[in-house]
Amino acid sequence: DVQLQASGGGLVQPGGSLRLSCAASGFTFDDHVLGWFRQAPGKEREGVSCINGYGFSTFFRDSVTGRFTISRGSAKNTVYLQMNSLKSEDTAVYYCAARAGGCSAYGSSYDYWGQGTQVTVSS
């Protein structure tokens, strides 16, 4: 069975950092990409970032470029989203997702989803 387990969310003050983790299993990582999405209350889900099996990454939001970093663990089955200089507008439930092929900012194109982890940025 395919499983994606997101973790690492929490409450952090503006300017703080969090590292989200997504542990994946049940599919071939070399031909799948893993992406991070987020959904804030009352807003649509939006793509944040994506990384492929070779470590190439892309970001879908200018607002996180330079503050967020995506990476894969040495075993490839874990993806991290390092979030620095967090702002209140980063508050959302963050999801990891996987799809075969290349990165896409469209969540509907992803086949597998984790359960989400809450990130709250507040003083």
Image (cartoon, rainbow, N blue to C red):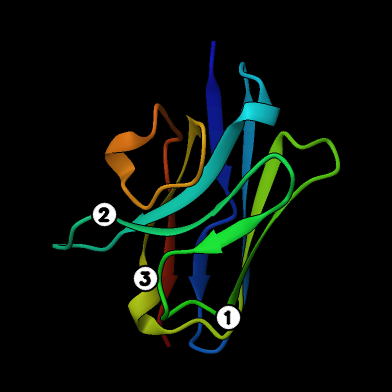
Q: Residue furthest right?
A: 74
- Taking 20 as reference, is 110 left or right? left
- Taking 84 as reference, is 39 left or right? left
How far from the left and from the top, in percent, is residue 41? 20, 62
- Label 3 or label 2, whichever lies nearer to me, is 2
Q: How many C-alpha atoms fall within 10 Å of the one at disc 3: few (<14), some, or many (≥20)?
A: many
Q: How many C-alpha atoms fall within 10 Å of the one at disc 1: few (<14), some, or many (≥20)?
A: few
How far from the left and from the top, in percent, is residue 2? 53, 17
Residue at point 51%, 33% (across, down): 101
Q: Nearer the viewer, residue 11 or 94?
A: 94
Residue at point 59%, 82% (across, down): 66
**Which residue in the protein does label 2 denote?**
45
- Identity of the amino acid at label 1? Arg
Q: Quadrant where the N terminus lies?
A: top right
- Identity of the amino acid at label 2? Arg
Q: CA distance from mark 3 to mark 2?
A: 12 Å
- Taking 21 as reference, is 37 left or right? left
Q: Are marks 1 and 2 in contact (CB under 8 Å)?
A: no
- Secondary element at image label 1: loop
**Which residue in the protein does label 3 denote?**
91
Q: Nearer the viewer, residue 48 or 106?
A: 106
Q: Choose the circle earlier in sequence order: 3 or 2.
A: 2
- Identity of the amino acid at label 3? Thr
How far from the left and from the top, in percent, is residue 56? 68, 54
**Which residue in the protein does label 1 denote?**
67
